[in-house]
Image (tube, rainbow, N blue to C red):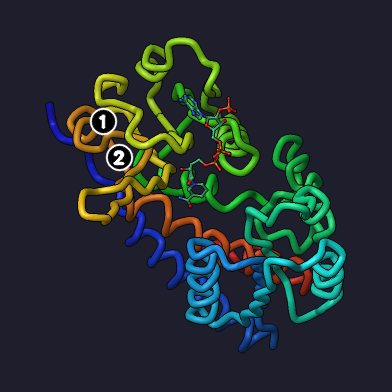
Amino acid sequence: MTRAIIIDGKAAAEELRQDIAQHVGEARDYHHIVPGLAVVLVGADPASQVYVRNKNKFAVEVGMRSFEHFLPEDTSESELLTLIEGLNDDPAVHGILVQLPLPRGIDTQLVIETIDPVKDVDGFHPYNVGRLFTGGQGVTPCTPLGCLELLKRSVGDLTGKRAIVLGRSNIVGKPMAQLLVRENCTVTIAHSKTLDLPHECRRADIVVAAIGQPEMVRGDWIKPGAAVIDVGINRVPLPGGKSRLVGDVKFDEAVEVAGFITPVPGGVGPMTISMLLRNTLLLCCRQSKIDEGFCERP
Ligand code: NDP
């Protein structure tokens, strides 16, 4: 059996950023508009700080305006809502992202629903969730969008494929399943109560693993030739106080069976940020009444 083709998410994400940078330049030169992304972080969680800094760094790199709001851990819900309302009204801001999780005592759903749906760059507002399910103009969450892009780049047309999504969270599993349905896949959604997960996986041409369980998906769960997208990011301890990142899939085993597979790190992770930038550009075009076709790849 031949080894899987390893899907290079880093390279795909870089290529997308180059396209986006070109479009941002054209928006500036021909429409005199600079897309703006506001990122809000409450508290000092080190992992969240790294994510937020990266998001801002890449936004600036592609020529966007980046507005960082680092708020202390003891920020009240009403202070956060007031900030969001200000960003909703700010014409320089086209996309608003509030980094999750939020500290205890802040109602996450209320915060998400306070973001103007037209600026909801993460696509978590119920309006955009509904649009994903019913069709029409909305915003699609960045991580599932990145997974789909990697799948289409490697597999091509997904019509008729049997897909399984492991995980049913609102930010990854559910929107991912819906995107695959839209691509004409036959989709199973699995979760912690699913009976005989290995059997369900073995039937799938496409496996998207988003369960947050280090290396749980084994090589013998994979149908030969299947495409495996590993969303999981799990830090596992090593002797000597060090640690390493692993996905939800046991890569060394799955790579011997699958047709395509994403590594961790270097697979889905980099795509999430590129999709965030793409969504920001898209929202900027919509708010500035620029034809959305402008955001498509040249
Ligand atoms: P959640 O914790 O919100 O959801 C996990 C899902 O996995 C739940 O639906 C849960 O089932 C299911 N699950 C948990 N354990 C098992 C099990 N043993 N067997 C089957 N299903 C199980 O996680 P997220 O969706 O937010 O994230 C999933 C993973 O993806 C994490 O590792 C996270 O770090 C990573 N991630 C990566 C991103 C990226 O950019 N690469 C972005 C976002 C997340 P149930 O509903 O029954 O509890």
**Residue type at mark 1?**
Ala
Q: Determine crowd level at label 2: few under 14, some 14-19, many 20+ residues with C-alpha closer than 10 A.
A: many
**260 or 122, which lies in front?**
122
Q: Position of residue 82 (x, y in %)?
A: 86, 70
Q: Which mark is residue 258?
A: 1
**Residue at the spot of label 2:** 261
**162 or 89, which lies in front?**
89
**Taking the image as drawn, is residue 267 in sight?**
yes
Q: Which mark is residue 238?
A: none
Label 2: element kind: strand
Q: Quadrant of residue 17?
A: bottom left
**Residue type at mark 2?**
Ile
Q: Where is 31 relative to 50, above or below?
A: below
| Residue under the image location 80 percent in, 60 percent down | 115
| Residue under the image location 41 percent in, 47 percent down | 233
| Residue under the image location 84 percent in, 65 percent down | 81
Distance (Cα) linking label 1 and label 2: 7 Å
- Quarter the N terminus occupies: top left
Is the Cβ of the residue at disc 1 closer than 8 Å to that at disc 2?
Answer: yes
Q: Position of residue 121 (x, y in %)?
A: 67, 60
Q: Quadrant of residue 200?
A: top left
**283 or 294, which lies in front?**
283
